[in-house]
Amino acid sequence: MIRRWMVAAALGLGMAWASSVELSNSQAQYIAQKVWQNEGAGQDKYLVHWNDGEDFASVGIGHFIWFSKGHTERFREVFPLVLRYMEAEGVKMPVWLNAKTPLPWNSKAEFFRAKNAQTKQYMELLTFLKMTKSYQARFMAKRMNEALPQMLDTLHDPAQKALIKRRFEQVMYRPDGSVNERGVYVLLDYVNFKGEGTLESERYKGEGWGLLQVLEHMDPKEPNTLKSFADSAKAMLDRRIRNSPPRRGESRWRLGWFKRLDTYWK
C-alpha cells in the first residue's frame, strides 16, 4: 500500500498540513507503465522522441522535456531534474550523461539521423531510459509531492489556498481518509503531463493549464471527484488550444489529450 505521512507547509496564516506519498517498488512499476502507456503507447521506441511542432526532444516514460545547448523555451525543462534525482539516488548513467548535459542533437533532423542510424550515444540513452523506468516514476511522485506547497506559495488569498488544498486532497484520498491509488495516479500523471501551473511562462494570453488551474475550475456539483478533475482538465486544455499561437497547431493534440484524461475516471 502507498505509505502516507504528513509534512508541514506554510500557508501564510500559520501552519497547515500537506499530504505526501511514497511509492513501493511494485507501485512505481505500475505507475511507470500507466504513464508510459499515455505518453508513448508503451513502446520503447518512443522513449527518445521529438514531436512535430516542437523545438525540443521528449525523453523517458514521462516524455520529459530536454533542450539542446543554448536553447530556451516557455516550457519547463524537466529531464535535467530527473537526472539530478537519479544522481542523488546513485543511479549509474552513461559516462557522457549527467544533470548538466544538454540534449546532444541541435535539431529535429539531426536527432532523427542519429535515431535512424542507431548511433552509440542514441542507443546508450535509449537503454538507460528502458532500465530506469521505476526511478522515473519515483521522480514523478516526488514532483507531485512538491506540487501542493509550490502551488500554495503562489496564492495570496487564504480562501483560495484552502480551496486548492481541499481539492488536491479530495483527489488523493477517499472519503474515509485512505489513499486513493487512482487519485495518486491522476495527480502524478497530470503534473508530469502539463505541469503545476505556477510558471508565468507556461501560459498563453496570461492563462495557464496546469494542475493549479484544473483544481481551481473543478465543478463542486459533480459527485465523481475524478470525473470533475478530468472535465476541468479538458476545459483548461481547450482554453490552451484557443489561446495558443496558430503556428503551433495545437488542436491536433486535442483528441489524444482528452483520451488520456478519460483514463483518470473511466
Image (tube, grey):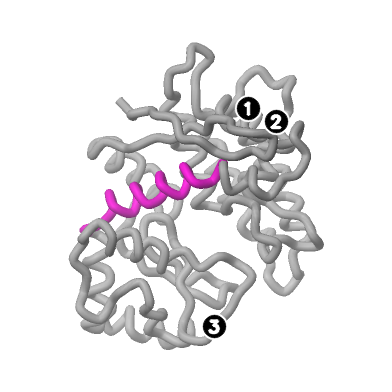
Q: Residue furthest right?
A: 205
Q: Residue 261 appears at what percent x and percent y?
A: 56, 40
**What's the CA distance linking mark 2 and mark 1?**
5 Å
Residue 148 sits in quarter? top right
The Cα–Cα distance between marks 1 and 3, rounded to whole angstroms, is: 38 Å
Q: Residue at x 69, y 59 (%)?
A: 251
Label count reads 3
Mark 3 crowd level (few <14, some 14–19, many ≥20, 10 Å Cα): few
Q: Which residue is mark 1?
A: 166
Amino acid type of the residue tagged 1 in the rendering: Arg
User: Is 246 left, or right, of 49 in this rendering?
Assistant: right
Q: Which residue is mark 3?
A: 71
* On-image quarter of the N terminus: top left
**In this view, 119 is above or below 218:** below
Instruction: Tell me where the magenta segment starts and ends, as one range.
Output: 131-148
Q: Which residue of the protein is positioned furthest toward the top in this rendering?
A: 176
Label 3 or label 2, whichever lies nearer to me, is: 2
Q: Position of residue 77 (x, y in %)?
A: 50, 68
Please report contact status of discs 3 and 2: CB closer than 8 Å, yes or no: no
Check whether the beta carbons of the residues at disc 1 and disc 3 lie within 8 A of each other.
no
* Residue 137 counted in the magenta span: yes
Q: Are marks 2 and 1 in contact (CB under 8 Å)?
A: yes
Name the residue carrying label 2: 163
Does the magenta-highlighted stretch encompass residue 71? no
> Quick one: label 1, few (<14), some, or many (20+) residues within 10 Å?
some
Return the x and y of residue 232 as percentages of the image width and height: 69, 37
Local crowd at mark 2 within 10 Å, few (<14), some, or many (≥20)? few
In depth, the one of 161 and 242 nearer the eye is 161
**Cα–Cα span, label 3 and label 2:** 37 Å
